[in-house]
Image (cartoon, coloured by chain):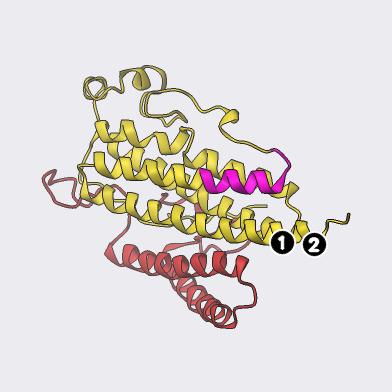
Amino acid sequence: MWIYQKNLEYPVKVCGPNPKLAKVIITQYGGPDGELSASLRYLNQRYSMPTDKARGLLTDIGTEEMGHMEIVATIFYKLTRGVSPQQMEAAGLGGHYAQHNHALFWNDANGVPWVASYVAATGDPITDLTEDMDAEQKARATYEHLIQLSDDPLITDVLRFLREREIVHFQRFGETLNDVQGFMNSKKFF
Amino acid sequence: MDKNQENPQAQKVTTTAYNNNNQEDMLLEIQQLQFTAIELNLYLDTHPDDQQALMSYNSIVPQLKQRIASYEQLYGPLFHFGLSTSQLSWQWINSPWP
């Protein structure tokens, strides 16, 4: 069960419409290393984790990532709000406008739609936790690229927050990987 | 309505429909406290026996609950599905939505 809380984890303000910036930030909504991939990956992998600790952490981080998807959605919505079709087109969002108008859609910065194969679930907890750590690093790198591209200081502030969260998640996944490795070694009998 | 809609040159343009600044400030306090709780929660997931972190987490909970109750009394429920009551009319559907 999930309960919705009617506020963002971190407030989002923008200096004004900026469809060019929106076009690249959308990758953290529906790109390979975006927040949809992250939340679904963790919430799906938790079933095959061998320890309660790992199940708990995947549930909590998966839930926080859903909140991050909401933050990225809010950024895109605010950056494109009131932007004309011509301005969308000039910013490279002509295709987006044709298919979605001002609605949001899960695709990457080049318009490639989200696919489930961005996410792995091998059923092997070591493999899955290693993938999670890898995913956090890819998300961190992407946020750093977006910070380099951002010309809106208010958006840069939010991107910095999201980048920092990936680092914390990476740390927690690393601790969980050690813990699960210890658990699995203790279960081996030869 | 946008606070700065009349002045498109305004430094800070917010497009969230708060009723007033107080609502935004109260929500910010909730967001700050909750962030502390989230951070401690994830830490405790991998350090369940850290007594100091546990005490910090437990001390945040009543502060957060109290601020949520004050906010909800003025501006309506922050939670659905039976966790918050609504006064007079069904305020859950009212703006601001994130």
Q: Colour of chain B?
A: red
Q: CA distance from mark 2 to mark 1?
A: 6 Å
Instruction: Say what amino acid the circle numbered 2 marks.
Output: Ser
Give above or below for B20 relative to A2.
below
Question: Most extreme residue toward the front, as rendered?
Answer: A190
Q: Is residue A7 left or right of residue A155?
A: right
Residue A88 picture location, percent across and down? 26, 24
Q: As displayed, is residue A187 above or below residue A132?
A: below
Q: Residue at 63%, 36% (x, y): give it.
A: A120
Q: Is residue A15 above or below residue B55?
A: above
Majority SS type along the magenta span? helix
- Chain at tag 1: A
Residue that badge 2 annotates: A186
Per the image, the residue denoted by label 1 is: A182
Instruction: Determine the colour of chain A.
Output: yellow
Q: Residue at x 56, y 45 (%)?
A: A39
Q: Are marks 2 and 1 in contact (CB under 8 Å)?
A: yes
Evaluate whether residue A68 shows in this view.
yes
Q: Residue at x 13, y 50 (%)?
A: B10
Between residues A52 and B88, which one lies in front from this camera angle?
A: A52
**Residue at the right extreme?**
A190
